[in-house]
Image (cartoon, rainbow, N blue to C red):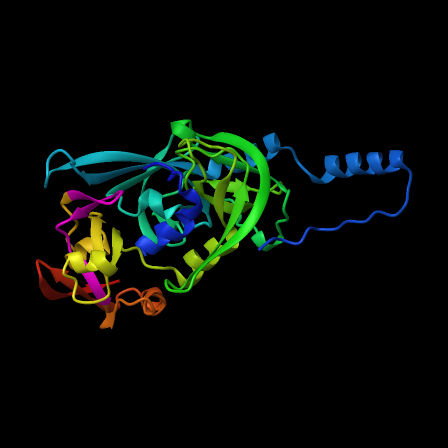
């Protein structure tokens, strides 16, 4: 699984979420008029006493950072209907004492297997317990926690100011526990009324590359204030601007509403494209991939099997098309309601999907 990047990354935040699914005030500081030498001396002494170095902080937080190795099935493009196993790579970090790991949704959303590797090389299987692809956040649960590993704290991202120094720890290109240093370059809130989402991101100039996805962005107190999501690029590599979902956004999505993990990805079809698929309504969600041992697999959803290209986009056809949830038809105005219903489902509670399969309407019943 690689860090998503393309020439249209500026539209990444909206187009990716639609298919699956604020300039900041500067902090003005004033100093009482005192001699220049005294200002320099005070700043030096204060920094030495209150701000540890990146190296010191890294020693403290690095044991809680994990490299995530995933395995999932992909459709063989040169063999219609055939499948092959592919491996993916990402990062994450341990939070709390119950074995929870936060990462990016696109790292694990359709993974059949997930393994977390710690600093000492210990590898522990993990399962996905919550995921919101629209916010690009996921929560894993480890089978066990290595002895002596302390979780890292989620900071209050509302207190972060532009220009603040930060550092990222992850596995760019598989180089585990690599640290890069930079600053918070901006703060943006992506709003999509039709999908019912409002997601807050930090922009950063900290170097980010494939394998960093889902990794933590720390402030200089050793707190996680962002979760690495994507980059803005024309070359495919880092070009000086990356995106991290804020820690407060993660706290709300993963520990507040806690969106259920579906284990599927899909593409939203509308307009002429929906008509070409003979979808009997305005919108349909064409299933692309379904993970093993996921609610989507359990309920019986079928993934796409045949790759086709429409315009500049390649998609898989032959799978189910979701038409509605709990009798709520997919429309531009119903996405928020559907998301809310799924988020409020308790463990053991049932739900019903209305789908189109081979031209016929079918109901599938599942349990969270």
Image: magenta residue range: 307-324
Residue at x 51% of width, y 51% of height: 247
Give above or below for 353 relative to 248: below
- The picture quadrant where one finds residue 235 is top left
> Is residue 311 on the magenta stretch?
yes
Residue with the most extreme top position: 175
Residue at x 18% of width, y 60% of height: 275
Residue 148 seen in this snapshot: no
Question: In the image shown, does 157 or 237 lie closer to the viewer?
Answer: 237
> Is residue 107 on the magenta stretch?
no
If the image is split into quadrants, where does the C terminus sit? bottom left
- The picture quadrant where one finds residue 7 is top left
Give above or below for 29 relative to 354: above
Where is residue 254 drawn, in percent x and y? 42, 56
Magenta-highlighted stretch: main secondary structure? strand
Residue 215 seen in this snapshot: yes
């Amino acid at each position: 699984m690689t860090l998503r990047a393309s020439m249209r990354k500026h539209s990444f935040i909206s187009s990716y979420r639609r298919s699956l699914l604020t300039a900041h005030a500067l902090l003005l500081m004033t100093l009482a008029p005192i001699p220049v030498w005294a200002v320099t001396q005070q700043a030096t002494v204060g920094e030495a006493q209150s701000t540890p170095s990146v190296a010191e902080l890294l020693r403290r937080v690095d044991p809680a950072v994990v490299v995530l190795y995933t395995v999932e099935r992909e459709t063989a493009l040169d063999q219609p209907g055939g499948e092959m196993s592919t491996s993916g790579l990402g990062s994450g970090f341990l939070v709390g004492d119950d074995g929870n790991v936060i990462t990016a949704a696109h790292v694990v959303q359709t993974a059949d297997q997930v393994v977390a590797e710690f600093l000492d090389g210990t590898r522990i299987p993990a399962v996905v317990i919550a995921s919101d692809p629209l916010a690009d956040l996921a929560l894993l649960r480890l089978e066990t926690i290595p002895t002596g590993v302390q979780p890292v704290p989620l900071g209050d991202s509302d207190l972060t100011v532009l220009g603040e120094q930060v550092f990222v720890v992850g596995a760019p290109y598989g180089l585990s526990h690599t640290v890069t240093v930079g600053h918070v370059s901006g703060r943006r809130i992506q709003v999509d009324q039709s999908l019912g989402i409002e997601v807050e991101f930090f922009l950063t100039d900290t170097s980010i590359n494939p394998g960093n996805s889902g990794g933590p962005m720390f402030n200089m107190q050793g707190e996680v204030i962002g979760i690495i999501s994507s980059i803005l690029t024309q070359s495919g590599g880092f070009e000086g601007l990356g995106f991290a979902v804020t820690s407060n956004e993660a706290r709300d999505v993963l520990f507040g509403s806690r969106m259920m993990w579906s284990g599927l990805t899909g593409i939203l079809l509308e307009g002429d494209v929906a008509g070409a698929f003979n979808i009997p309504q305005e919108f349909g969600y064409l299933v692309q991939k379904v993970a093993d041992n996921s609610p989507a697999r359990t309920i019986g959803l079928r993934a796409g099997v045949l790759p086709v290209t429409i315009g500049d986009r390649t998609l898989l056809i032959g799978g189910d098309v979701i038409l509605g949830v709990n009798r709520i038809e997919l429309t531009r105005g119903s996405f928020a309601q559907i998301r809310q219903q799924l988020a409020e489902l308790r463990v053991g509670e049932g739900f019903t999907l209305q789908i189109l399969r081979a031209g016929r309407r079918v109901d599938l019943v599942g349990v969270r």
